């Protein structure tokens, strides 16, 4: 007899509600839940991959240890004991441990409740994560402007009349630093009430194809676009509205003269967006209708990523759209981390590369390989990788590949033998996704509507397997014991979650939320930023000195010659989620998506035809990849999707290895980074493209 369970999809930020039909331990179907309070029945292909993850024959079920180059299955007690003993020995010799947190750990609230104990047990100083390959500029801006690294205004698309998206593709991602499931329908609803969507991107993305207007922009030049829009907005609306005037501190007046010094035609020429388009966008943002500008991955992973995110906030302030219905608003979720956890930190730290930003206690991942390759007592000798695959996600992955081989101990918490975990001494695999509960711990506070939803596990855990949180907690206890420290009690994630919910302003209990399998609607986002600010004077700190200094550095760069070279950008597809769904049979169906998108004019100039093999070369490396000629990318731009590169020796992902694929991050350059946040530059990498040498020689 089959049963249907309402559940939240944990794969991406959208957190869509799904209906999972099962019979025994067999998953019969996964469909969208029309009664889910946030996603309203929407589902994307990624949700169907849950069944592939649960039943994947390549998935590990017990701990494995690398012995003479082969994997040997061992018991949990042996794994924990050996890891603790080896770590204690390494630290006794003065060795330095480190940890890397991958993207999936942010989607597992159980890990979040336990990882702090493991960090303390290890004595961790060097923490790295996917954040410094992605969104860390947002956190720097939010810390300085609003007083908390996670106080994040998001576009209120359900009431907006004009939305500008720069360097984001929510039609594929369902949001990013913005939980917005059912995005396509929400756009159609906005357009039905005479609203407009404008997309600015070097590629005609899936989101651009939904838009009322799409404009190409030269990769890596978005800062010029934002300065130009802000300059025009300040001319159209020289005074703040009464609400924002009372919220913004006096440093706002420092912005006006600094922006006034820029020349609009020069900015337009620099970024490739016409002055007419810039003026039209500014006019629409300033009109008496709610609107917003939103920028994501494409503008964050650039040299001026933090400056870009600050300029976006400044535009929304100047146009009167911050803290406005239909503009950008700060959510009030059931679990409100803003009121529970600390404000975070923005500091600097000494690294192998010299002084670098240290945001929320995390070191920039661009320095990761260097810290393992250095030859002094500060070298990282032991590494714990939590659900991450930095060989494929960090710049110059080939160098990181080599660096991992230098470690004295590496432990991976992973379901698979991946491009990263293949280097491990031990792999500790968690149970399947249907054997874990779920709560949107970090993503609820980014949702387009206030809500709460908890999903219990559907299947009992098989004997001998463990959830992620159990692995983390039990290993921490073993390390504490081996090093002679007091052994803490384990507090189960459900108890921690319940306590945090009750400590939040709404004061809900986990039992209340669990009783509503379709979620609880807590209402639309509302203007209440004045109650949420955590700055000392309870005002928005509009113009932090670091931002103003960086604006000056950008102004000087406008006079530098722009190299005449192809610029490489990444991309994602609705059937992808970084590298961790690469072994799903359902998602890998169809044509190979790991191709080099290139404009017809650029292809013709290089003698390339559709389906040819091309060599793409950057400063750090080269890859050979199939050519896809399309006018969806602008002239001067080529695109390779991220999340591929599973052809490396030792990777045990049978589906992922079926089609030829390469990692874009074998080409990105760790020497390039955002000065204010330490974030990697993964966008606008200079490259050359030519027909693959073997083909040319054969002719």
Image (cartoon, rainbow, N blue to C red):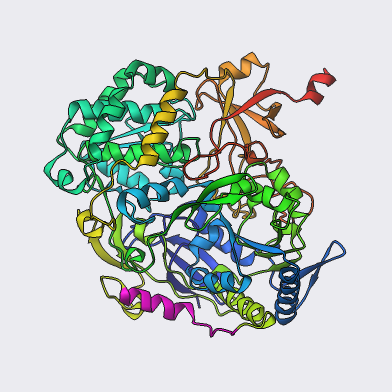
The quarter of the displayed image where residue 208 is located? top left
Give, as a single range, the part of the protein colored magenta.
486-503
Residue 91 on image: x %, y %:
71, 69
Residue 618 on image: x %, y %:
67, 30
Q: Compared to 552, does 385 lie above or below? A: below
Residue pictured at 37% horizontal, 78% vertical? 499
Q: Quadrant of the C terminus?
A: top right
Residue pictured at 26% horizontal, 48% vertical? 540
- Image side of residue 668 versus residue 504, left or right: right
The quarter of the displayed image where residue 415 is located? bottom right
- Report if residue 493 lies within the magenta region: yes
- Image side of residue 196 versus residue 80, left or right: left
- Report the predominant secondary structure element of the magenta stretch: helix
Q: Compared to 343, does 392 lie above or below? A: above
Q: Out of 355 and 13, give the one closest to the viewer.
A: 355
Residue pictured at 52% horizontal, 44% vertical? 679
- Image side of residue 665 versus residue 233, left or right: right
Residue 306 on image: x %, y %:
43, 41
Q: Compared to 78, does 152 lie above or below? A: above
Q: Out of 54 and 468, give the one closest to the viewer.
A: 468
The quarter of the displayed image where residue 317 is located? top left
- Most extreme residue toward the right is 68
Q: Compared to 265, does 408 lie above or below? A: below
- Report if residue 411 lies within the magenta region: no
Residue pictured at 38% horizontal, 62% vertical? 33
Residue 526, visible in the rendered structure: no
Residue 75, visible in the rendered structure: yes
């Amino acid at each position: 007899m089959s049963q249907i369970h309402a559940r939240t999809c944990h794969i991406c930020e959208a957190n869509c509600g799904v209906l999972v039909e099962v019979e025994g331990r067999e998953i019969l179907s996964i469909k969208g839940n029309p009664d889910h309070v946030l996603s309203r029945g929407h589902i994307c292909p990624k949700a169907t991959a849950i069944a592939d993850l649960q039943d994947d024959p390549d998935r590990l079920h017990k701990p494995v240890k690398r012995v003479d180059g082969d994997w040997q299955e061992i018991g949990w007690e042996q794994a924990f004991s050996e890891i603790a003993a080896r770590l204690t020995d390494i630290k006794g010799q003065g060795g330095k441990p480190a940890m890397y947190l991958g993207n999936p750990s942010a989607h597992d609230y159980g890990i979040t409740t336990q990882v702090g104990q493991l960090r303390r047990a290890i004595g961790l100083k060097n923490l790295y994560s996917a954040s410094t390959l992605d969104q860390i500029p947002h956190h720097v801006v939010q810390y300085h402007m609003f007083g908390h690294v996670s106080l994040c205004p998001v576009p209120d698309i359900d009431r907006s009349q004009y939305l500008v998206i720069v360097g984001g593709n929510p039609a594929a991602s369902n949001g990013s630093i913005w939980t917005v499931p059912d995005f396509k329908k929400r756009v159609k609803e906005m357009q039905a009430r005479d609203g407009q969507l404008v997309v600015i991107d070097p590629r005609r993305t899936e989101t651009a194809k939904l838009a009322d207007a799409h404009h190409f922009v030269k990769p890596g030049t978005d800062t010029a676009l934002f300065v130009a829009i802000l300059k025009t907005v300040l001319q159209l609306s020289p005074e703040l509205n009464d609400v924002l005037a009372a919220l913004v501190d006096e440093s706002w007046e420092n912005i006006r003269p600094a922006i006034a010094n820029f020349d609009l035609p020069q900015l337009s020429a620099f970024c490739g967006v016409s002055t007419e388009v810039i003026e039209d966008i500014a006019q629409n943002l300033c009109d008496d209708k709610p609107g917003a500008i939103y920028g994501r991955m494409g503008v964050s992973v650039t040299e001026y990523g933090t400056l870009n995110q600050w300029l976006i906030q400044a535009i929304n302030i100047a146009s009167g759209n911050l803290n406005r219905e239909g503009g950008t608003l700060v959510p009030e979720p059931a679990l409100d981390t803003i009121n529970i956890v600390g404000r975070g930190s923005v500091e600097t730290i000494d690294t192998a590369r010299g002084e670098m930003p240290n945001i929320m206690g995390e070191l920039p991942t661009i320095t990761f390989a260097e810290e393992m390759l250095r030859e002094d007592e500060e070298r990282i000798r032991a590494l714990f990788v939590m659900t991450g695959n930095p060989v494929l996600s960090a710049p110059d992955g080939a160098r990181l590949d080599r660096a991992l081989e230098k470690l004295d101990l590496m432990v991976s918490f992973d379901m698979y033998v991946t491009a990263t975990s293949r280097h491990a001494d031990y792999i500790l695999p968690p149970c399947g996704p249907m054997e874990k509960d779920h709560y949107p711990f970090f993503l609820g506070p980014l949702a387009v509507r206030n809500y709460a939803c908890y999903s219990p596990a559907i299947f009992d855990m098989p004997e001998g397997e463990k959830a992620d949180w159990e692995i983390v907690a039990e290993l921490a206890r073993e390390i504490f014991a081996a090093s002679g420290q007091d052994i803490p009690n384990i507090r189960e994630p459900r108890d921690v979650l319940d306590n945090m919910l009750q400590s939040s302003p709404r004061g809900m209990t986990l039992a209340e939320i669990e009783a509503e399998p379709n979620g609880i609607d807590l209402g639309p986002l509302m203007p209440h930023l004045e109650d949420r600010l955590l700055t000392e004077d309870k005002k928005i700190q509009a113009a932090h000195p670091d931002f103003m200094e960086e604006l000056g550095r950008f102004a000087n760069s406008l006079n530098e010659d722009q190299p005449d070279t192809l610029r490489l950008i990444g991309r994602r597809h609705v059937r992808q989620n970084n590298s961790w769904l690469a072994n799903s049979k359902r998602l890998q169906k169809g044509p190979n998506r790991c191709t080099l998108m290139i404009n017809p004019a650029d292809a013709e100039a290089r003698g390339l035809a559709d389906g040819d093999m091309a060599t793409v070369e950057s400063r750090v490396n080269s890859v050979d990849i199939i050519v896809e000629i399309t006018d969806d990318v602008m002239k001067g731009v080529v695109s390779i999707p991220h999340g591929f590169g599973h052809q490396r020796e030792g990777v045990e992902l049978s589906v992922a290895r079926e089609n030829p694929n390469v990692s874009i991050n074998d080409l990105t350059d760790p020497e390039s980074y955002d000065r204010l946040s330490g974030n990697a530059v993964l966008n606008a990498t200079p490259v050359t493209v030519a027909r693959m040498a073997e083909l040319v020689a054969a002719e």
